[in-house]
Image (cartoon, rainbow, N blue to C red):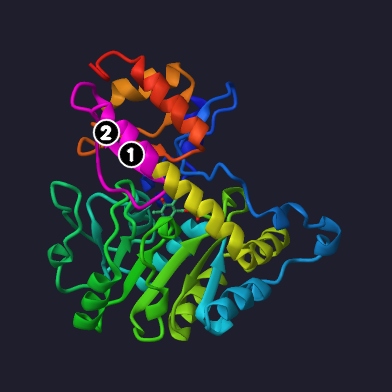
Amino acid sequence: MSAMDSQMKFWSSSARNAVPYTPGEQPKDRKFIKLNTNENPYGPSPRVLQLSTQDLHMNLYPEPTAYGLRKVIAEMNSFSPEEIFVGNGSDEVLAFAFGAFGDEDHPFSFPDITYSFYPVWSDFYHVSKQIFPLGEDFSFDLTLAPEDGGPLVIANPNAPTGIALPSEVLVNYLEAHPDRLMIVDEAYVDFGAESMVPYIRKFPNLLVVQTFSKSRALAGARLGFAFGQAQLIEAMNRIKDSFNSYTVSAFSQAAGIVSYQDSDYLAETSSRIIATRERAKAALKELGFAMTDSMANFLWVTHPQESGQFLYEALRERGILVRHFSNPALTEYLRITVGTDDEMDELICQLKNIRGINQ
Ligand SMILES: Cc1ncc(COP(=O)(O)O)c(C=O)c1O
């Protein structure tokens, strides 16, 4: 018996049965052009870099509800702080939502192709799941969602396809299903999709989750937040405070405040990424790639001549990391984060040197 086996006898059934999410690679050994984890190449607002740690009173525990940050997010969107939840990345916010609104009798519905953490949280929290198909072109058809059941969670834009539904479709769904909670994961919304935040007041069955990781370039700070009417937020707080009172560090709270206040920087860097994305779409189409009309900071592409696995490896050898998924429905595709114009030019240049491309 190996040392590992001998320690596995201590594992709980949760540890034994867990099928964890696999995050994208964060290589340490070599300098890659990193287009694999949807990070933002421009860095956070300069106001974040000017923060002084002396002002943060690091000897004290942070404000447990991130009140200052909730207040800023609330005021800038005409809400009250009771309608805002802040967590350690939107992964944590979403995980708490699975705990707060799902169980064996309240199954979560989500599409078969979407953010692959949703099934992981369902299993971890013993939440039943009802998975419904996307169209063959990865399009969203909410009429395919099971009619009865608990919360519906969708990523809008979806991951890893980048396809966004117009808010009108979601509004119609909410109106037709007043007894069903809809959770909209808007991790990528600032790159051109329509947000559901303006509808929070109208729909008590709507929770919208956003993040500082993508458009605000603060993936390292781990900050996510949610908008919802007060009783939805209260349920989230009950789960959080049964797990860890201080999920968001003093530094991250302070960084979140100055970053959220800097709307100009957000607008400027997001529009640069959108422009680069559209330029990269055109260049990749010229090389024969097919793709969805991504509204996110990544592209979802496939090439008729070469497999996703081959292209992933060929790019890796050439110093460019992109994301490839082994799931059979996704294996012909690559998810390519939109970097700077120079990084995308280098991607196109390297692709031209790969067998089967541009011939
Ligand atoms: C659809 C979607 N939701 C949520 C997240 C989590 O982001 P974070 O935990 O960094 O806020 C991601 C990260 O890639 C994502 O793709």
Query: How many residues crowd around disc 1 within 10 Å: few (fewer than 14), some, or many (20 or more)?
Result: many
Q: Which residue type does callout 1 highlight?
A: Lys
Q: Nearer the viewer, residue 245 or 11?
A: 245
Discs 2, 1 touching: Cβ within 8 Å: yes
Q: In which quarter of the image is residue 311?
A: top left
Magenta residues, start to end: 278-307
Residue 7 relative to residue 130: left or right: right
The answer to whether residue 122 is magenta is no
Secondary structure of the residue carrying tag 1 is helix
List the single residue furthest toward the right.
54
Taking 283 as reference, is 214 above or below it? below
State the residue at coordinates (25%, 45%): 292
Taking 336 as reference, is 179 above or below it? below
Mark 2 vs ligand 1: CB below 8 Å? no
Residue 72 makes an appearance in the image? yes
Where is residue 56 drawn, in percent x and y? 80, 63
Quadrant position of the N terminus in the picture: top left
Residue 31 relative to residue 196: left or right: right
Query: How many residues crowd around disc 2 within 10 Å: few (fewer than 14), some, or many (20 or more)?
Result: few
State the residue at coordinates (55%, 55%): 268
Q: Which residue type does callout 2 highlight?
A: Lys
State the residue at coordinates (26%, 19%): 358
Q: Quadrant of residue 121?
A: bottom left
**Label 1 sits on residue:** 281
**Label 2 sits on residue:** 285
Taking 224 as reference, is 304 above or below it? above
Secondary structure of the residue carrying tag 2 is helix
Q: Distance between the residues labelled 2 and 1?
A: 6 Å
Quadrant position of the C terminus in the picture: top left
Q: Nearer the viewer, residue 147 or 241?
A: 147
Q: Nearer the viewer, residue 54 or 194?
A: 194
Where is residue 253 drawn, in percent x and y? 67, 64
